[in-house]
Image (cartoon, grey):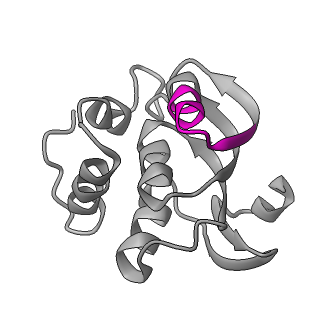
């Protein structure tokens, strides 16, 4: 499945082996933009993503997706998805998703960890990605 990400895709949504969406953007942008513009996909849709952290995991739960593939996944994201019976395949498991400079945990990871539900995470991520409102990210 990871071959769908080659050579430069970061996020792919598959439904019945057909690509319904793909992106070269990083972070949560591809999935947030897809959901905002297209709505929640069929729950048989499969997410294939380069990096799955807590933010993406919350979006997966918001969508009701049942299967995800992540080249890299964080331990908190894996635990959250397993808790909700999502089937997860991955190549690398990391303690946390880090900032690009690797000095701290990704701000989105910290931010969504304080939210109460996947829906709240989605609504806040729309504010950040679509409306370009940084909220309280640090």
| Residue in the picture at 53% in, 63% down | 25
> Residue 27: in sight, yes or no?
no
| Residue in the picture at 34% in, 39% down | 108
| Residue in the picture at 21% in, 38% down | 137
The C terminus - image quarter: top left
Residue interval drawn in magenta: 77-89
Q: Nearer the viewer, residue 135 or 100?
A: 135
> Residue 61: in sight, yes or no?
yes
Is 133 contained in the magenta span?
no
Q: Nearer the viewer, residue 117 or 20?
A: 117
Residue 15's place in the image compared with 128, above or below, is: below
Residue 45's place in the image compared with 112, above or below, is: below
Left or right of 133, for residue 100: right
Question: Residue 111 location, x and y as percent?
Answer: 26, 35
Splitting the image into 4 quarters, where does residue 23 fall?
Answer: bottom right
Residue 128's place in the image compared with 37, above or below, is: above
Splitting the image into 4 quarters, where does residue 113 fall?
Answer: top left
Residue 101's place in the image compared with 62, above or below, is: above
| Residue in the picture at 48% in, 35% down | 100
Question: Residue 126 location, x and y as percent?
Answer: 27, 62
Question: Residue 82 location, x and y as percent?
Answer: 60, 32
Q: Nearer the viewer, residue 7 or 84?
A: 84
The total of numbered circles placed on residues is 0
Question: Residue 62 location, x and y as percent?
Answer: 41, 55
């Amino acid at each position: 499945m990871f071959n769908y990400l080659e050579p430069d895709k970061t996020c792919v949504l598959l439904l019945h082996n057909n690509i319904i969406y793909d992106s070269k953007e990083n972070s949560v942008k591809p999935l947030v933009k897809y959901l905002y513009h297209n709505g929640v996909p069929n729950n048989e849709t499969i997410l294939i993503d380069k990096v799955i952290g807590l933010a993406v995991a919350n979006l997966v739960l918001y969508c009701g997706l049942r299967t995800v593939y992540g080249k890299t996944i964080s331990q908190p994201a894996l635990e959250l998805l397993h808790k909700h019976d999502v089937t997860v395949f991955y190549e690398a498991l990391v303690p946390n998703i880090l900032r690009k400079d690797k000095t701290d945990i990704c701000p989105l990871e910290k931010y969504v960890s304080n939210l109460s539900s996947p829906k709240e995470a989605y609504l806040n991520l729309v504010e950040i990605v679509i409306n370009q409102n940084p909220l309280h990210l640090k």
